[in-house]
Amino acid sequence: MDKRDRYRGALIGEAAGDALGYTVEFLREPQIFQRFGPAGITDYVLDEQGVARFSDDTQMTLYTAEGLLFAHTRGALRGIMASISYYMSFMYQDWYRTQTEDFSERTRCAWVSGFPELFARRAPGTTCMTACATGANGTLESPINDSKGCGGIMRVAPVGLFYSKSFSNMTRHMTYADIQLQGAEIAALTHGHELGWLPAGAFAQIVSMIVHEDSPLPEAVAAASATLSEAFPKARMIGALQEIMERALSLASSGLSDLDAIHELGEGWVAEETLAIGVLCALRHQGDFAGAIAAASNHNGDSDSTAALAGTIIGAQIGYEAIPHRFIEPLELHEAIVEIADDLSTGCGHLSEFAPLDRAWAHKYIHHDYVQWRREGSKY
């Protein structure tokens, strides 16, 4: 499979799972099954424009992807760069503006802020909103709060896409421990509890292993669990995360129904449960994109986040071309998501201060006006 197809599959899979689960995020199971039938929600509920809208989960994932590309573009062209978290805090503050201000043609940090569609409040998490309002500047050593909500893990898939142990390019080569550390540091910008950022680190490694090494999901989960102590030697909650990850693997092969197995893990409002439920549903529906995101949506809890993680995993495994068309065509900003996935795949290795710069790349990650620049051609 073309590696780029996996990148696209992961990001489109995340957005598709998010869009499916977002419809039922705040419904209880009796309400879901009464409204959608005994199988629950299995297809998008489109708005009056025929569009499947995603939530803050995908919004923030796009800003994470752009933050990585913006940071490494600066590093490639200037020869030095600050920490990824430094740039990411500005990206998340830019996302916060989309939640609190009216759309403006003038972009600030992120080129994706040129899309009016992102200036929409789709049930943003209170923790993310509060943290971003004050600068999104938490660290592992100096936590900004004591939240372990899933707002950190749901946005870090681009870390696993961008970095790999197998890359020879040193700007993108990372050990598993460093990949986990990067994912955790990005989550810790807004979520201070160890179980708010430890699962984000584990998820970043899982995504990286699936995309870059074609690792089976159980192998990736076991490896991520084993890496935790190396990546975070001072963390005290590693055992709790390892326990729920092991439980997810065990439940995947149990005789319980999907819903009963999910009940054994929780509701997904906190990050370790989100990861466990996403892994469970991906394992129970291997190769079945529709089945995985439906299973991860039809429960009492944080349906959009659990379905987003399941969609990321399955999408990364099967690739974009294997995702059913009905989950792609109506999806909000699907062409832009594919383009961002392609940029993550390309990386910044083609950039140099001594070489001509691709105009589109410059308008994205230097001038930040790409949407306006391309609007003349009506690409979107």
Image: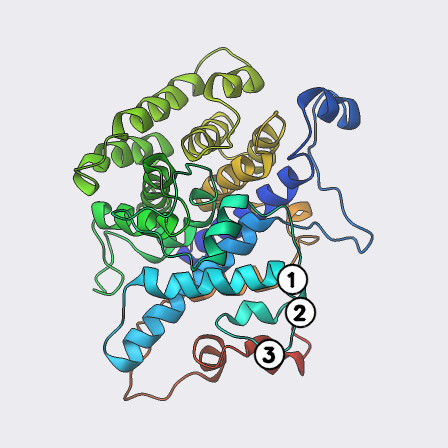
**Three-letter amino acid code at the position of disc 3:** Arg
What residue is pinned by disc 2?
Answer: 103
State the SS at label 1.
Answer: loop
Residue at the location (60% across, 75% down)? Answer: 371
What residue is pinned by disc 3?
Answer: 106
User: In the image, 45: left or right of 239?
Assistant: right
How far across and how far down the image is residue 94, in percent?
Answer: 51, 65
User: In the image, 228: left or right of 195?
Assistant: left
User: In the image, 270: left or right of 370?
Assistant: left
For the C terminus, the quadrant is bottom right
Say whether marks 2 and 1 touch (CB < 8 Å): yes
How far across and how far down the image is residue 256, in percent?
Answer: 52, 12
What residue is pinned by disc 1?
Answer: 119
For label 2, the crowd category at 10 Å Cα-Cα, with few meaning under 14, some 14 to 19 and many 20 or more, is: some
Observer able to see residue 203? yes
State the SS at label 2.
Answer: loop
Please tell me whether residue 168 is drawn above or below residue 359 in the rendered image: above
Sequence-wise, the earlier of marks 2 and 1 is 2
How far across and how far down the image is residue 79, in percent?
Answer: 23, 78
**Three-letter amino acid code at the position of disc 1:** Phe
**Three-letter amino acid code at the position of disc 2:** Phe
For label 1, the crowd category at 10 Å Cα-Cα, with few meaning under 14, some 14 to 19 and many 20 or more, is: many
Instruction: Give how far apart the Cα atoms at labels 2 and 1 are.
Output: 6 Å
How far across and how far down the image is residue 72, in percent?
Answer: 33, 70
